[in-house]
Every structure is written in structure tokens, then in C-alpha cells.
Image (cartoon, rainbow, N blue to C red):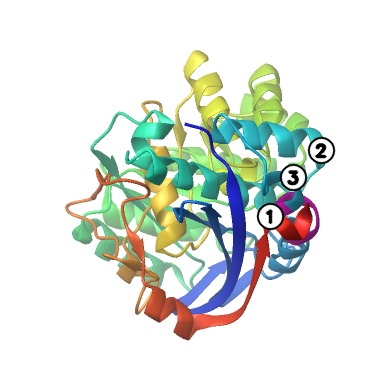
Amino acid sequence: MMLKPSRLALHEVRLRLKEPFRISSGESWERRILLVELSDADGASGWAECVAGETPHYSPETVDTARIAIERWIAPLVLGRSFQAPSDIYDTLAATIRGHHMARAAVEMAAWELAARSRSVPLAQLLGGSRSTVETGISLGLQADPETLADLATAAVEEGYRRVKLKIARGRDIAFVEAVRTTLGDDVALSVDANGAYTPNDTALLRLLDAFALVMLEQPLAAGDLVRHAVLQRVIDTSICLDESITGPDRAADMVALGSGRVINIKPGRVGGFTAARAIHDLAAEHGMPVWCGGMLESGIGRAHNVALASLPNFLLPGDLSPSRRYWERDLVTPEWTMDRGVVAVPTSSGMGVDVDTEFLAACTESSSVIEAGDVA
């Protein structure tokens, strides 16, 4: 079945978090989210979420740059053209546009959802997923003191989460991790995420984390520095997981070749979409390297895409796939995402398996725009 997108709508919404989320680069109280709705001439639509933030802290991209990229350069390459498969859209965009991975991913992932709905198959099935449920972990932001963090971690384990991830930064690391490990005991899967907050000068400090039997140390050094991550991995026992460093299959291949880590956090929005995410998944599987699916404070639309991806066989570690109520008073989808004893069910209905709550979406929308195939011909 050919894929021929004819209309692209952008919806910019603003959702307030139930509580602030703190990482080494700052604090977030709300999410400004850019949604893509891609439609064909038959009236079928596919949705996706651009994961770019409001500021260029996590990535050079922002909501504003993504919107410009989609309207000016990406939409004209996609609308009114015929594609054999959604992966052809990835190839077209990658061959023409440098960078702008998150903007490209939003349109490519919407095309995957459109294809799944058009074929009346679940998105997970179209991607090659094989699981009916995926294990769920939780990510806990920076806290003011170790005791507060330990209490939050205890509550998360009691709620059923299969893995607890702690954000760390200079001055809020060793004592905080020690408090959580002591409180939870040795049987709970525990990991930490630095979001690039450290440098090679912190090697001695980072080696202290080996005492806590962590599943992984995520992105300790700067995003672009695969070489120094490789040096660090050789002198610490804890497995390094790379997140921001992996922006596509080529960077994943470099990581494997250099030995820059032993685990990859695959966020489809970060790497350019599902086509690239599947390629990274396959590469890691070939080298016996587990992968998992991280989160970017997505709404239920982005969560749907992450759940579908995490159903692939080499996603061997629990993902950051918390239920809707973890972050939002009300989500943008129906039904909202739920968790049962630490797992999330992979939808079996067509497309992403949830529907956009159009009434609530309209109430949250700050601006919208529509591009038709005829506008870019």
C-alpha cells in the first residue's frame, strides 16, 4: 500500500506538569509540545510528537527551530509525494536535510502511524514488535537532600516500577545514590543519569559509583565525546549508557567500535525517527548490547510511540514509560496510559492504540497551522 501524505497540521500545546522535573541543566514546570498530524487524501491521519524542548539544553533543537524546519523544508519533501513505506520518508529527509533530527522524526513517526492506521494494524506490529507488554522504569529528578530522594525511590518501588533511575549532578551524587541504595537494598534495579554533567576530571568520583551495583551510568560526559567515554568505560566497572551522544545509527556504530559504553538509550525522536531507531536496535542486538527506551516528558502521543518501539525484542531493560498520571493531571489521549505491576500493555488496535482527545487538545492549543500538498507544489 502506497503512502501519499497530502496534509500536515502542526498543533502547539502547553501542558503543565504535576510537579517540577529537575535535571543537571535546569528545572521544568511545563512542556511546550509540538504535535504533527499527517493525513492522506482518504482522510486517514497519523499523529506524532516532536520531543524538542523549549530551550537548547538537551539538544541544539527547540520547539521553534523544529517548527521552522517542518514548515519550510520537511513538509515540501513529503506532501504530495508517494512512498512505498515510511522508511522511504526517513531516507528522503536524511539525504536532503542535515541535522534537525527531532523535526524530521516527528514527521517520519507520524507517517509510520498513518501507515499503521491505513493498514489497520498496530503500530508495534508494523515496527516489528514482538512483546505484548513492556517493563516500566521511573526517572526521579534532582532532589534537595538524600532523604527526600530515598523516600521517592521507596514509593516508586512500592508502586511497582521495575527500575529506578536517579538524576545526578555535582554535589548531588554519591551521598544521594548511597542513601537510595541503602534504603532499597541490593535487589532493586538502580541506575543514574548525569545528562553530561561531568568531565574526565571527575573520573575518581565516578568510580565511587561502582560500589552501588548500578545497572548503568547514563551519559556522564559531554554528548559529543565518544572517545573520552571509551576511556572512562575502561576504568570503571559500571556499564556506561549513552543517550545524548547517539543521534543516529552512525554514532551508535562509532560507540560500538570505540567501546564507549555497553548500553544504548534509544529515543526515536532524538535519532531521526523509527527507521533509525530500528537500525540502532538491530546493530546493538548484533553486538549483544541491550537497549532501552528513554523518555522526554512526552504526552500520551509520544508515549504511544515509545511503547510501540519498546516492544521490539532487544529492548531488554525497563524503559521510562510511566503512566499518564505520573506527569499530567489530564493527558492528550484516551484512554490514558496506565501501568499494572510495573508493566504497560502494548496496544493491539490499529495505529498507536490510543486516540487523541481532540476536545482537550483544542483547550490546550496555543497555535496551529496547516500545510496542504498544493501549498508546496
| Earlier sequence position, callout 3 versus callout 2 | 3
**Residues at circles 1 and 3 in contact by the CB criterion of under 8 Å:** no
Residue 214 seen in the current view: no
| Earlier sequence position, callout 2 versus callout 1 | 2
| Earlier sequence position, callout 1 versus callout 3 | 3
Q: Image height check: is 284 above or below 139?
A: above
Mark 1, residue position: 373
Residue at the limit of the structure toward the bottom, as seen here: 363
Cα gap from disc 3 to disc 2, whole angstroms: 9 Å
Cα gap from disc 1 to disc 3, whole angstroms: 10 Å
Structural crowding at the residue carrying mark 1, measured as other residues with C-alpha within 10 Å and reported as few (<14), some (14–19) or many (≥20): many
Nearest to the observer: residue 362 or residue 163: 362
Q: Please say whether residue 73 is one of the residues in the magenta stretch.
A: yes
Structural crowding at the residue carrying mark 2, measured as other residues with C-alpha within 10 Å and reported as few (<14), some (14–19) or many (≥20): few
Q: Position of residue 42 (x, y in %)?
A: 46, 51
Structural crowding at the residue carrying mark 3, measured as other residues with C-alpha within 10 Å and reported as few (<14), some (14–19) or many (≥20): some
**Residue 342 located left or right of residue 263:** left
**Residues at circles 3 and 2 in contact by the CB criterion of under 8 Å:** yes
Mark 2, residue position: 96
**Residue 54 located left or right of residue 321:** right
Residue 285 numbered tag = none
Mark 3, residue position: 77
* Residue stretch in magenta: 71-75
Q: Residue at x 61, y 52 (%)?
A: 6
Three-letter amino acid code of the residue under disc 3: Leu
Secondary structure under the numbered disc 3 in the rendered image? helix
The secondary structure making up most of the magenta span is helix
Q: Position of residue 167 (x, y in %)?
A: 52, 58
Three-letter amino acid code of the residue under disc 2: Thr
